[in-house]
Image: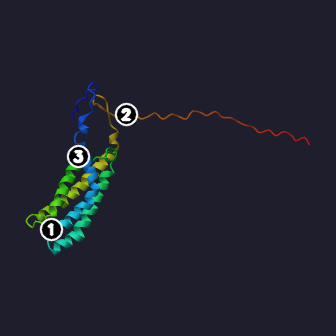
């Protein structure tokens, strides 16, 4: 991938990292409230759209605990990454994955019989894929391959290891104890 060289004389920051940062930070802040609001939406959707008794049992015993725990697990995996904690923003992959998964969970709350079952299967598949995406990103960041640095012109290099200095020979001071004979 080629990178455009920055012009240091212009003085403007690299706009690639700033553009869209508000959206990534908004998703960072949304992850924990989503663990509470998405299950709540499923319960409200059941009540508003008159889904029935079996749907209530599904919402109460499967959907609410499942969505709550799965969202918390995904949130912990995402927030475990160093770059997410440092920038307080998720990656674009996270934005795409959580957008799709949250849209599917929200659509489940409408309880439309025509498309509810396929959407539920799709929501489960997307949730599992999001789990593996979060693990992959966490693993990729944890690998030592991120020790690769880039020079000013974009050329990658591996920085040399810092030379370990041998401890200098310390001066040895010998104190001999002499006892003087007592004069009594």
Instruction: Give the quarter of the image for residue 37.
Output: bottom left
Q: Name the secondary structure under disc 1.
A: helix
Going 14% across and 60% down the picture, which residue do you hit? 107
The front one of 128 and 176 is 128
Q: Position of residue 161 (x, y in %)?
A: 41, 35
The disc at residue 38 is none
**Residue 106 in sight:** yes
- Distance (Cα) linking label 3 and label 2: 33 Å
**Which of the marked residues, 3 or 2, is nearer the chain's N terminus?**
3
Residue placed furthest toward the bottom: 53
Q: Earlier in the sequence, mark 1 or mark 3?
A: 3
- The kind of secondary structure element at disc 3 is helix
Q: Are marks 1 and 3 in contact (CB under 8 Å)?
A: no
For label 3, the crowd category at 10 Å Cα-Cα, with few meaning under 14, some 14 to 19 and many 20 or more, is some
Residue 91 in sight in this render: no
Residue 32 rendering spot, x and y as whole percentages: 29, 56
How far apart are the two marked residues, 1 and 3, measured between alpha carbons?
31 Å
Q: Residue 134: horizontal and vertical position, in percent?
A: 27, 52
Quadrant in which residue 72 is drawn: bottom left
Q: Are marks 3 and 2 in contact (CB under 8 Å)?
A: no
The quadrant of the picture occupied by the N terminus is top left
Quadrant in the rendering for residue 143: top left
In the image, which is nearer the foreground, mark 1 or mark 3?
1
Q: Which residue is mark 3?
A: 23
Q: Which residue is mark 2?
A: 159
Contact (Cβ within 8 Å) of mark 2 with mark 1? no
Residue in front for this viewpoint, 55 or 163: 55
Q: Residues within 10 Å of mark 2 (few under 14, many from 20)?
A: few
Q: Which residue is mark 1?
A: 48
Q: Position of residue 172 (x, y in %)?
A: 66, 34
């Amino acid at each position: 991938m080629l990178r455009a060289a920055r012009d240091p004389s212009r003085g403007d920051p690299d706009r690639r990292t700033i553009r869209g940062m508000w959206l990534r930070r908004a998703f960072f802040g949304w992850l924990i409230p989503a663990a509470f609001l998405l299950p709540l939406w499923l319960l409200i959707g059941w009540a508003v759209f008159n889904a029935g008794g079996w749907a209530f049992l599904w919402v109460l015993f499967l959907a609410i605990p499942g969505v709550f725990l799965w969202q918390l697990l995904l949130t912990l995996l995402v927030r475990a990454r160093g770059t997410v904690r440092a920038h307080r923003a998720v990656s674009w992959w996270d934005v795409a994955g959580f957008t799709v998964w949250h849209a599917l969970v929200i659509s489940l709350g409408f309880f439309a019989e025509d498309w509810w079952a396929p959407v539920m299967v799709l929501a489960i598949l997307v949730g599992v894929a999001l789990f593996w995406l979060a693990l992959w990103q966490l693993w990729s960041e944890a690998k030592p391959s991120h020790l690769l640095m880039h020079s000013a012109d974009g050329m990658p290099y591996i920085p040399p290891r810092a030379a370990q200095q041998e401890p200098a020979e310390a001066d040895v001071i010998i104190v001999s104890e002499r006892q003087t004979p007592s004069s009594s």
